[in-house]
Amino acid sequence: MMSGMKHYKETADYINKMYNRQSQLDESLADQMRESEKIADATSQWRLMWRKFKRNRIAVVGGIVVLLFYLVALFGDFIAPYTLEQRMTRYSYLPPQRVYFFAGGRFQPHVYALETGRDPITLQRTYVPNPDKRIPIRFFVEGAPYKLFGLIPARRHLFGVEEGIISLFGTDGQGRDMFSRIIKGSQISLTIGLVGVALSLLIGAVLGVASGYYGGWVDNVVQRLIEIVRSFPPIPLWMALTAALPQHWSPLLIYFTITVILSLIGWTWLARQLRGKVLALREEDFIMAARLAGASDRWIIFKHLIPATFSHIIVISTLSMPSMILAESSLSFLGLGLRPPLTSWGVLLQQAQNTQVLLLYPWLMLPGVFVALSILAFNFMGDGLRDAADPYTV
Amino acid sequence: MLSYIVKRVLGMIPAILIISFITFVVIQLPPGDFVTSVQAQVAASGGGMDAATVEALRARYGLDQPMIVQYWRWIRGFPKGDFGFSLEWNAPVWDVIAERMGWTLLLSGLALVFMWVVSIPIGIYSARNQYSLGDNLFSFLGFLGLSIPDFMLALIWLVFGTLVLGIPAYGLFSPEMVDAPWSMAKFLDLLKHLWAPVVIMGVIGTAELIRIMRGSMLEVLNQQYITTARAKGLPERTVINKYAVRMAINPLISVLGMQVPKMISSSIIVGLVLSIPTIGPVFLRSLISQDMYLAGSILLFTSVLLLISNLLADLALAWVDPRIRYE
């Protein structure tokens, strides 16, 4: 009996000891799990995407160029040496000036002063740079007044000259500096794409997700609608719609109507892409689980489906930017889109529409170079984003 | 197959009706009508029109009728090939655009051929030599091609051709050939002018097709039947040309239907920049002068072309890929 008791106590001790050890083990295991959870948290989907995107150098370069373009657009009034409508009539159709960076071995950016004259035969203005008369380029120079961000009145420009003219990209027929006008034009060219994409996103995401999620007649109606819109080739339809804009509308109204017209076709592609994505997601377990748990359609769509398609929405929006910028500049170039005083790159290119003028003053084509550059940058960035959007596949 | 084609063609009739109605509404959107734009022109040249003349003109062109009546007047002629009357040209719409439609189709068709002839070999090369110098070079050029707007390319060609090469880089014919009767010399002159707009129109599409062909070829080359073909000792040329390319080309055919509207859009813009008599210049003018039946018919034709090209692409796909059955 005694030995039995003792035995019992030993056993109890042993069990206790074992239990303690187990709980220690449990604790360390829990620690480990907590640790690994932290890591899992740290490598969220977005971080994985960012990692994959970073590795694609050309996409990163594209992204940086896009960022740079928007920064220049934001601070455009400060960076441009002249304002949009500042006319220097003495210098009409001035070819791009050459900038010299060193004077007598010292860093001193300058341009040459110009002797203006007229060609005796063609009666065109001629400009002869005079190497003996240097005009230094000054930084943070006082110039024409403007409003930074349209709010803060200011006079300082990033650079400029105190006499003569500085015109990096030449001037147009009215002596307006193309460099300044291209920078100002970027404000409209680059934002019209953003607003247009945002609008198509709104329509496309709502209709695309609804069409994929509900199926049935909703899907049918949306798909027929898309088919009808897409049975028109885009450029002719855009031309017909923009030609309908009344001449007397205010610039702001024209601007927004153009974005609406552009997104009228843009949304269809987005809706198709999202519908496909939602059709696949709808069958996933987590949607089924949400539905079984009694979640409403609204909850599922806004809390599960839209967040799950978010990375795709970003990719699709980036990839639709080029076509928006392209469409706006094509229409404005034809004289159907925006019109002065709204100045986009396409509006600037209208001057290049006249063959005779273009052949005499080819630098009027320069705004088109920026259209191409911005599209290229968006394409590179969008391509990288598309590859990165699905970080779980290698 | 035949019943499928018939069904599709019949299905196009309601589609054309819907499209023509939307077209008519869009064309009618601008405030005012053709007579208002004539009035503005007359006023601009210092003249004036009294109210009676204006009303008489409106009544003559049927512009005083309700929209639905005007629409009916337009579409009831379709089966007879009558697409209304161009108020500005003072001629039936069809007479104004027939020749221009021809040039538009010719340019678009040639551009499509150019795209395929260039992009397929490059796509095959790029897929077989993935990440090689050539592949990277072609993808970079492809990106560049995707990014330069067609009107910009046309402008660059205009300046480069005229100032550097010293040839008139616009129009379809040299000035002395425009009114000459057709001859060998005129034909050669046409060819000299034709290739540049065709290439300009084809650049963006070529860049797209190279990417599609490369991707599709890479996918096919990884499949087991290619390994089998190689394992049984077929020469590499046979493996590529007879086994891989034939499969890989399908996505190219399915995007054919999407390429056609792009070509038409492009032919309008390139036609405007390089002064080529595509429908582009006429369309722009008709929109500005509100010559509604002309503008409407052009918009309608471009959409019908799109419907037809989609059908042709579907049929071509069924013909190339025996797994596809339309019943």
Image (cartoon, rainbow, N blue to C red):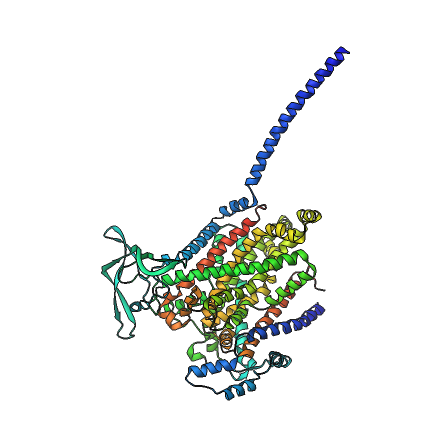
x then y, percent, for residue B3: 72, 69
Which residue is at the far right?
Answer: A1
Q: How many marks?
A: 0
In the image, residue A144 above or below residue A23:
below
Q: Nearer the viewer, residue B320 or B152?
A: B152
Instruction: Locate residue B3 relative to residue B255 in the image: left or right.
Output: right
Q: Nearer the viewer, residue A110 or B192?
A: A110
In which quadrant is the N terminus of chain A drawn? top right
Furthest toward the left, the residue is A132
Determine the residue positioned at 54% across, 54% down: A315
Task: Report the front residue among A269 and A379.
Answer: A269
Is A218 drawn above or below residue B267 in the view shown? above
Q: Nearer the viewer, residue B127 or A253?
A: A253
Residue A53: percent from the left, percent from the top?
A: 51, 48
Seen in the image, is A366 located left or right of residue A327? left
> Taking the image as drawn, is residue B161 in sight?
yes
Rendered position, A304 above or below A332: above
Q: Give percent across and percent down for residue A385.
A: 53, 51
Residue at the image position 24 percent from the left and 50 percent from the top: A105
